[in-house]
Amino acid sequence: MTDVQTEFTPSDEEAVHSPITADVDGDAESAPPADLDREGDIAADYIEELLDIADIDGDIDIDTRNGRAYISVNSEEGTNLRLLSKPDTVTALQELTRLAVQNQTGGFSRLILDIAGSRDARQAELATLVDRAIARLEEGAAEASLPAMSSYERKLVHDIVSERGYVSNSRGEGRDRHTVITAA
């Protein structure tokens, strides 16, 4: 059976109460807190039903921050939740969940789905990619391009690059949009 828990921290409250948020590419989006809470609840119900159908155990946490609803599904070690934690599977389930939310709300959803720590694992992979790119810059390259990735992953990369004291920009269109890193 699946447990649903809502998590809300004071630092998240500041981000959620801002009625206008900007995505990675600077597009302003309206995201009132009530809408994010509703998105989270709809998404959690959808994921819970999916887990029940597949007979997979997991605990669902709902969080709102940075103008997005975050849904995390976790379970004890050794359970069958790991079957859903592969990056491509998480991405597909996230898109299906966004569609379920859109179907009920009539609006586009930017929710983020994390299954069994898949997002933390991906962030570690992205940090490794950034470190390799920075090594190329330190060896004399003028710039270093990373592979194409989603806007959320590019946002993570921009944050990592900034922390390391370098500059990054997104280039390309659609599925070819990627991050290019240069020295500060």
Image (cartoon, rainbow, N blue to C red):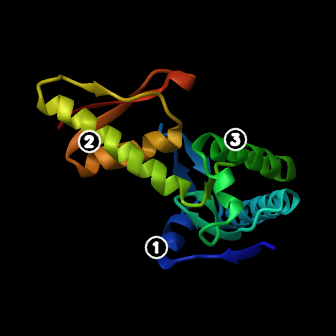
Q: Which mark, by number, is residue 92?
A: 3
Q: Earlier in the sequence, mark 3 or mark 1?
A: 1
Residue sticking out furthest to the front: 78
Report the residue at 26% width, 52% height from top: 163
Q: Amino acid at mark 1?
A: Ser
Report the residue at 31% width, 36% height from top: 168
Quarter of the rendering occupied by the C terminus: top left
**For mark 1, what is the residue?**
11
C-alpha distance separating marks 3 and 1: 29 Å
Mark 2: give few (<14), some (14-19) or many (20+) Cα within 10 Å: some
Under tag 3, what secondary structure? helix
C-alpha distance separating marks 3 and 2: 28 Å
Q: Nearer the viewer, mark 2 or mark 1?
A: 2
* Quarter of the view holding residue 61: bottom right
* Quarter of the view holding residue 16: bottom right
Q: Nearer the viewer, mark 3 or mark 1?
A: 3
Report the residue at 50% width, 65% height from top: 15
Instruction: Name the one closer to the observer, 181 or 12.
Output: 181
* Quarter of the view holding residue 140: top left
Q: Is residue 14 left or right of residue 113?
A: left
Relative to 25, does residue 64 appear above or below in the rendering?
A: below
Q: Earlier in the sequence, mark 2 or mark 1?
A: 1
Q: Amino acid at mark 2?
A: Asp
Image spot of residue 19 (x, y percent)? 58, 59
Mark 1: give few (<14), some (14-19) or many (20+) Cα within 10 Å: few
Image spot of residue 77 (x, y percent)? 59, 69
Report the residue at 43% width, 50% height from top: 123
Relative to 98, does residue 73 appear above or below in the rendering?
A: below
Q: Is residue 101 left or right of residue 20?
A: right
